[in-house]
Amino acid sequence: MTRKAPLFLLAILIFGGACSNDSGDKELRELFLTPQDGKLGFMNAKAEIVIAPQFDVADEFHEGLAAVAVGDRWGYIDEKGQYAVNLQFDQAGQFSEGLAPVLVEKRWGYIDKKGSFVINPQFDTATPFKEGLAAVEVDGRTGYVDKKGTFVINPQFDEGTSFSGGLASVESGGRYGFIDKKGQFVVNPQFDGASRFSDGLAPVISGKRVGYIDEKGRFVINPQFDDGSWFEEGLAVVKSGSKWGFIDSSGKFVINPQFDQAGNFSEGLASVLVGDRAGFVDREGKLVINPQYDNMSTFSGGLALVSTEGRWAYIDKSGKPVWTMTEPKQAEDGSSGQPMLASGGAPSGMGDDANRQKQTVADIRNTGTAMFSWLTDQVGSGAAGDTVNLMNYPHISRDDLVRVLVPQYMQEVPARDGWGNLYEYHLNTGNPLAPQVMSIRSPGRDGVFSSSSYYSVTSFIPGNYDEDIVWADGFFVRWPQKPG
């Protein structure tokens, strides 16, 4: 897979959080993740805790089950908090169409809701099933399998997304196009980037500008935006110059570019950033919840998760808190000891943020240098591009990374960043010649990764302590740096 990931997939940036769902599938949400004292549990819409905080990592419920982790083992619980699938996997994804991808000894396979393997572990990466097919990677090439594990579309693409509306965007030879479920190109590879279809339109990059095409590849909205996302609830968030606004399916601005960042609409509201504060607007662009938060998710089930100075809360659509995290206890090692959401980190406590950010950058640089030294010993080195998709990098546990790097390349591999959140490590030990080999990321102070996998290569103001810090293949992808 190449480094030219679609830029506009970053449109949700800090606004997607743990509650976003870019697959186009929306379930009726009844349970909500609640972080407390270093663990994660679940509450209902009345803010009643129904599953006590006990997990180190957890995902939202999908098809009645939620992936959770205790220590370095993953399993699945039901909506009563009982284990439906015992803790046993190295990593676990969400259930979709009755199956879930799981990682066992560096290979991905698929299980059913009883925990039995339907497709044995054999893939380098695997995604949830959509429209009967799942995108998987074998030896650096992406193909699509059915629910028996049979390749319907052989591995041949540099990159591929899940099917949406019968089409999937794929990369071939550095250009993006769209295939049908037979693997035939419906829209030939011709774009610099492409995302999924929604409401009959798909955002594509052409000549460093984002436009929207129909299912025959014809431009309905000519390339003119600096960034953009797919349509949700009839509107798409786009960037014009340095500001973000919203367009309708004709390309007309419904909400003029005026925000420093914005997310897609969900349940009638969209998250926006004004300066360094986040709030919500309605479809007319009116601020219905004033910018006041450090971070937030989209609305789902009538609630949104927000944070202010490290304190997390769920709010309703009037902005009223319905649940607030109590003051977090300090872990024995002096860190905040907060848990991680499956899509990233989780809320962490306050402290000397400047020093913690510096420590995190130093940790990542030192560990990255050791990883790069290992790579140089294997094959040589590569170079970073404009964007990074971490889904292209095989995950590696800290224990496995220790076995690779210690003591030849470094004395100790750090487990937690400056705020006490776990680092996420990726290293392709099986194929050091792959285009993407290694990456490290920290979720920053808030403990919530701002993106599930896609990042633009850019710096941020050092005082933005909630920003992710990301390093890949010898270069920082997201890092703090003073302007000028």
Image: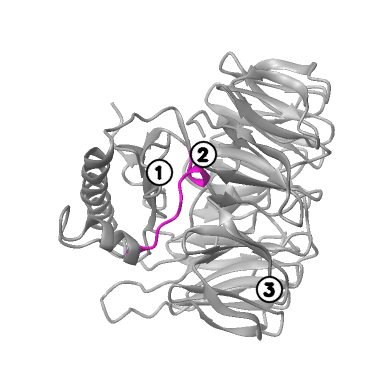
- Tell me the number on the disc at residue 140: 2
Q: Earlier in the sequence, mark 2 or mark 1?
A: 2
> Toward the viewer: 359 or 48?
359
Q: Quick check: marks 2 and 1 in contact, CB under 8 Å?
A: yes
Q: Quick check: marks 2 and 3 in contact, CB under 8 Å?
A: no
The residue at 54%/82% (across/down) is 53
Q: Give the residue type that dot 2 points to.
A: Gly
- Residues drawn in magenta: 389-398
Q: Position of residue 416 (x, y in %)?
A: 31, 64
User: Is residue 99 located in the magenta-colored stretch of the structure?
Assistant: no
The residue at 19%/63% (across/down) is 412
Give the distance between the C-alpha atoms of the residues marked 2 and 1, in whole angstroms. Answer: 9 Å
Q: Position of residue 51 (x, y in %)?
A: 63, 84
Give the distance between the C-alpha atoms of the residues marked 1 and 3, in whole angstroms. Answer: 29 Å
Q: For mark 3, give the secondary structure.
A: loop
Q: For mark 1, give the secondary structure.
A: loop
Q: Earlier in the sequence, mark 2 or mark 3?
A: 3
Q: Identify the residue position indicated by label 1 in the image.
A: 431
Question: Viewed as shown, does residue 259 lie left or right of 332?
Answer: right
Q: Identify the residue position indicated by label 3 in the image.
A: 116
The residue at 61%/55% (across/down) is 297
> Toward the viewer: 410 or 8?
410
How crowded is the residue under tag 1: few (<14 C-alpha within 10 Å), some, or many (20+)? some
Give the distance between the C-alpha atoms of the residues marked 2 and 3, in whole angstroms. Answer: 27 Å
